[in-house]
Image (spheres, rainbow, N blue to C red):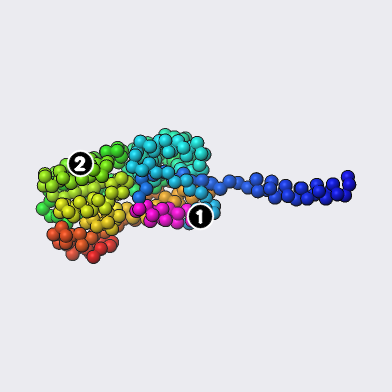
Amino acid sequence: MKRREFISLLGGAAVAWPLAARAQQPAMPVIGFLDPTFHDAYADRLRAFRQGLKDTGYIEGEKVTILYRSAENQFDRLPELAAEMVRRQVTVIAAAGGSPSALAAKAATTTIPIVFSVSEDPVRLGLVASLARPGGNVTGVNIFSGELVAKRLDLLRELVPGATRIAVLVNPANFANTATTVKDVESAARVMGLQIQIFNASTSREIDTVFASLVVEKLDALFVGNDAFLNSRRMQLALLATRHAVPAVYASRDYVDAGGLTSYGTNFSDTYRQFGAHVGQILKGAKPADLPVVQASKFELVINTIAAKMLGLTVPPTLLARADEVIE
């Protein structure tokens, strides 16, 4: 071989080796983040989710890519979005926003790991075999919001001692969540001797209609179910409750920050951090079948005394003393 040919061959090999090495590097894992609706309150939750990922060694854009998909309040689009994630062969599906996302993801794949965040019992929903040993390709974080229903009703009684007729607002499009909420509210109301009336709303216009009915029927207070769509309309709900002088209790502090009266429920920043950390564990190699479902353990009572004054309510000092935060 001539010297010139040898040098050319060597130079070509020197270029080819780094290219081959780069080609053999593993692709960055992709998280498919599936949610019924994204709204401005999600900024804090997504920050917490990313922090949970970071805690396990994954930084978005550096060690992991996140594919965000929202059904934009159209729950019937979730199966289609989950199927897209399966076609794109994401590494793991993060099913946020409750049972609709989780059930859609589970129906779409039995092989891609799924991590959920739901408020209902995941065993009853058929998502996992048990909390300790999920047993399939699904695991996640359980908020157990239903167990807090009685405490929210009791909170309403403390704020409005004479209240006996309570309106309950739910989103019928979120069927599993609504069925659980109605069952839990009915059970708690019977024990407390309260009368409840169920109202459905899955659009902004229907929310307006509900409040018109509350005024006509002169119901004493409002219990708002835990739901992604209703959360996205929290400013509308808080404004209407104030305008029509309807004391209302909510499942998350997002409503109170928007001007609502009071909330008792999961600290969603902490829950989404756990959610992200669980996804990170899957990326590190943990098997969903063996990774126990995490139960939310941090809850918060938030009271808006400004809203209380506008509603003509006096918040008992004992209740203020129990609050995790008071907005004044």
Q: What amino acid type is highlighted by mark number 1?
A: Ile
The prevailing secondary structure element of the residues shown in magenta is helix
Badge 1 or badge 2: first in the primary sequence: 1
Work out whether residue 319 can be spotted. no
**Picture quarter containing residue 300?**
bottom left
Q: Residue at left 31%, top 49%?
A: 232
- Is 2 placed above or below 304 here? above
**Residue 321, percent from left and from top:** 23, 64
Question: Count of labels shown?
Answer: 2
Q: What amino acid type is highlighted by mark number 2?
A: Phe
**Residue 7, percent from left and from top:** 83, 50
Q: Residue at left 23%, top 60%?
A: 304
Q: Dot 2, crowdedness within 10 Å: few (<14), some or many (≥20)?
A: many
Image quadrant where one finds the N terminus: top right
Label 1, secondary structure: give it. Answer: loop
- The CA distance from mark 1 to mark 2 is 43 Å
Camera-side residue of 143 and 8: 8
**Picture quarter containing residue 319?**
bottom left
Magenta span includes 52: yes
Residue hosting label 1: 59
Q: Which residues are magenta?
A: 40-54
Q: Residue at left 47%, top 53%?
A: 53
**Residue 202, percent from left and from top:** 27, 41
Residue hosting label 2: 199
Camera-side residue of 19 and 134: 19
Camera-side residue of 230 and 148: 230
Work out whether residue 261 can be spotted. yes
